[in-house]
Each structure stands twice: as C-alpha cells, then as structure tokens.
Image (cartoon, rainbow, N blue to C red):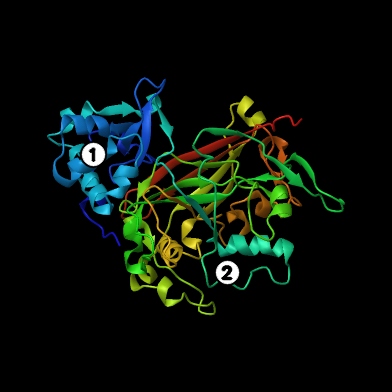
Amino acid sequence: MTALNETHDPKLRSWVASAQAPGCDFPLQNLPFAVFRRKGGVDGFRAGVAIGDQIVDLAAVARAGLFTGAAGEAAQAGAQDKLNALMALGQAAASALRLALSRALREGSQQQQALQACLLPQAEAEYDVPARIGDYTDFYTSIHHASNIGRQFRPDNPLLPNYQWVPIGYHGRASSIRVSGQSFVRPCGQLKPPGAEQPQLGASKRLDIELELGIFVGAGNPLGEPIPMAEAEDHVFGICLLNDWSARDIQAWEYQPLGPFLAKNFATTVSPWVVTLEALAPYRVAFERPASDPQPLPYLDSPDNRAAGAFDIQLQVELQTPRMREASQPGASICRTSYRHAYWTVAQMVAHHTVNGCNLQPGDLFGSGTLSGPTMDQAGALIELTEGGKKPLQLPGGEQRTFLEDGDTVVLRGWCEREGAARIGFGECAGTVLPARAMS
C-alpha cells in the first residue's frame, strides 16, 4: 500500500503556472498518465503526463535523456503508443518516473528549460484509450446500486444472497471501449415489452448511464497463481472514470440466465487520464462494513485493506440536452456521490478475480460497477434516479428525462480533496448518444 512521500506535499508549486489555478485537476501532486498526439494526427500517439493545462511528452523526455535509472526506463516505456509497457514495469517504475517529474516540474528546478521543450498544451492534443485492453471485467461493487435495482424487481428481497459474500462481476467487451468524446449510435436488440406475446428487434428506448471508475491492471500474474490481498494493489497501475452505457430494455429480456450481453457491449467510455494509486494515497479511508453484515472471507481481508483500502473519490454526473447545447448552457448535475461507499475495494476485486488462478495482464481493465451512494440523489444510473422511469428528472428550462434521448451528452467528473492535501482530479469522461441506425 503506497505511503505518503515528498510528491504529496501540498506546498509544492510548479513552474507551470496553470498547475496552481483554483480547481485545477492536474496540480504537481497528481501527474496522471494518458496517451495523446497533436490534433490532426501529424505525430503518432505516445504517453504523456498532465501538469496544469499542459502535457509532458514522454517520448520527447526519453529522446532528450532527461532521466536515468528506473525513471529513464519508465520514460522509454512511455514513448510507446500505449501505456502497456509502462504498466508492465510495475508500480516501482511508475513511481520513480513520477518522482523525477515532480522534482523537474517544481519551481526552481534546474531541468525547467529542458522540460519546457517537452510540453504540449492540452488544448492542442487529442487522446486515445490509454492502454491496449486485452480483457475487460465489469464488477458490481455498490450495495446501494444493487439494492436499488433489486428493489424494483424483488421488493421483498432486493439483495441476492451471494452479494455480501462475493464480488460479483462479468466479462465485458473490450473492443467497444473508447476514450472521452465518444459518440455512439443508440443500440438495437431484442425487446419484449410487458404484455407482448413475443420479442421484436428494435432500438432501445431505455438507454442509461452507469457512473463507474475504471481500474487499470499494471504488472500481471502467471496463469494458476492467485494474487493475495497483501500484494493486490501492487498489480494496479491506476484509476480513471468510466461510463458503461446500458440498454435497460434489452437487458431485461436477455440477461437471464447468463447476464448482460447486447445491453452492454455496444459502448463503454473511459476518461483519457489515469490517476496512479500513489497520487491517491492522501485520500485513502478505512474500509468498513456494518457489524451486522457478513465480514469478508480471509482471502478478501487484510489489515491494510481494513485500515485504508477505500478511496474518497468524489464523483459527479452532468447531463446536457441538445436544447441546452444550442443555448450554450452547461450540463445539469444529476448525481453527486463518492467511491468510499463501495462495498468492495480495488484490492478485493484483484484478489477475487485471481483466486481461481486467472491471469491478469498489463492493460486489463476492471469496471467498478455503478457507484451509487446511500441516498437517491447519489444514485449513479437513471434507472435508479427515476425509479425505473416512474419519476422523470426535472432539468433546467422545463425539460425532463427518464432515460437518455438522442443528442444527449453525459459527462462524468471525479476529484479528491481534503484538508491538508492538494486537490487532484480525473478530468472528464464525456459521451453523446446518436440516433439508432435504420434497420432493414
């Protein structure tokens, strides 16, 4: 578990002035990673690190030979078009690079002039999915979300008996994961409205969001060798924002007995910036369970996890309708919650995923599942916020939504802040719904 070190000092200031701007997501204490290129595709994609409104080009850093040792090796790995090589080096290499960058970007650094030549304004960049994702697993770590959904279908028994014992998950589709700014067509699939004698093919009318975090795997494990709780976080590179769009009406017909399929595999959106677990160290909180709930089995338990296995990451969902966009109005906030309410931690997801010997690989992605909090205004999906469409959301200008309409844009935001620590953020994760394709 990452301890606090000099990179977390809230008094640190960067010679990149924008890093000190109020509300900046990327101060010197953050330094998240992404894959980018200059707009227009003149250069190839390569890894970069955010500082203020700038990007440190790791390919340029590597060419200039600014760092040596583990930091230099990590910079060379970051010169590639995806983060997989850097992820595979493990947390120690990423930490060495982050420390070298922190020192080089501080006010008074002797490397300022050399590093300035490696900067590109974020406004001039475009992004790609951070890693080559071999496998994608979506978990179900919010007991509040599971209870809210279960209550709609099983009022007397909303929570299935296995939920409090095992981190529930399913294997999703990696090929349809795209980076923030994604636009995707409304999905089609089999629908069976209540009372209908048979299903029919049609476009989803109950298109939804899922407010999630994405967990990128770093160093993997050999097939057949489980990762114990004490080592689980050593295999995690970092965390991003994730929206796992869901077609609730397609899902209702298809999910039994095997679970989600076409209702989920059409689009998943991730934010470009991956915040390392090291950067998140100041925002750790205790992992707690109600005393009346079953406590985790020994393979899902550890002293470190109990003491500080959870993260207080603040999360927000904004919805902007076409009418708002035409009027140059910002999106309306429809949800605000925190990752600290999750029922299962990052370490528990890793340990459970591998307890049967499953091998993880650098760049694999976990979805946390919808991160709803204990009150309805903290619900991370429209199916919860509108109670299955029965209570439409009231939006500015008199508009309403039960589920997403064509042209709607959803933006996820995340940040961490507490007294005695610098505020850090995740950027944004945005996606827009396009009309369904015409069916022959």
Looking at the picture, tell me which residue is in the foreground, 32 or 286: 32
Residue sitting at 48 percent across and 44 percent down? 413
Residue sitting at 34 percent across and 36 percent down? 21
Tell which circle, 1 or 2, labels the residue nearer the N-terminal end.
Answer: 1
From the image, which quarter does the C terminus lie in?
top right
Tally of marks = 2
Element carrying mark 2: loop
What separation in Å lies between label 1 and label 2 (alpha carbons)? Answer: 42 Å
Q: Quadrant of residue 329?
A: top right
From the image, which quarter does the N terminus lie in?
bottom left
Image coordinates for residue 93, horizontal then vertical, percent: 23, 49
Image coordinates for residue 208, horizontal then vertical, percent: 65, 46
Looking at the picture, tell me which residue is in the foreground, 389 or 37: 37
Image check: 225 left or right of 89? Answer: right
Residue sitting at 67 percent across and 63 percent down? 150
Specify the label residue 163 is tagged with: 2
Looking at the picture, tell me which residue is in the foreground, 167 or 397: 167
Image check: 244 left or right of 198? Answer: left
Specify the label residue 75 is tagged with: 1
Image coordinates for residue 136, horizontal then vertical, percent: 49, 50
Badge 2: how crowded within 10 Å, few (<14), some, or many (20+)?
A: some
Mark yes or no: residue 342 visible: yes
User: Can you say whether 381 is above or below 354 in the image?
Assistant: above
Mark yes or no: residue 31 visible: no
User: Can you say whether 407 is above or below 252 in the image?
Assistant: above
Badge 1: how crowded within 10 Å, few (<14), some, or many (20+)?
A: many
Whether pointer 1 and pointer 2 mark residues with C-beta atoms closer than 8 Å, the reply is no
Residue farthest along the front direction in this orientation: 223
Which amino acid is tagged 2?
A: Tyr
Residue sitting at 49 percent across and 72 percent down? 289
Which amino acid is tagged 1?
A: Ala
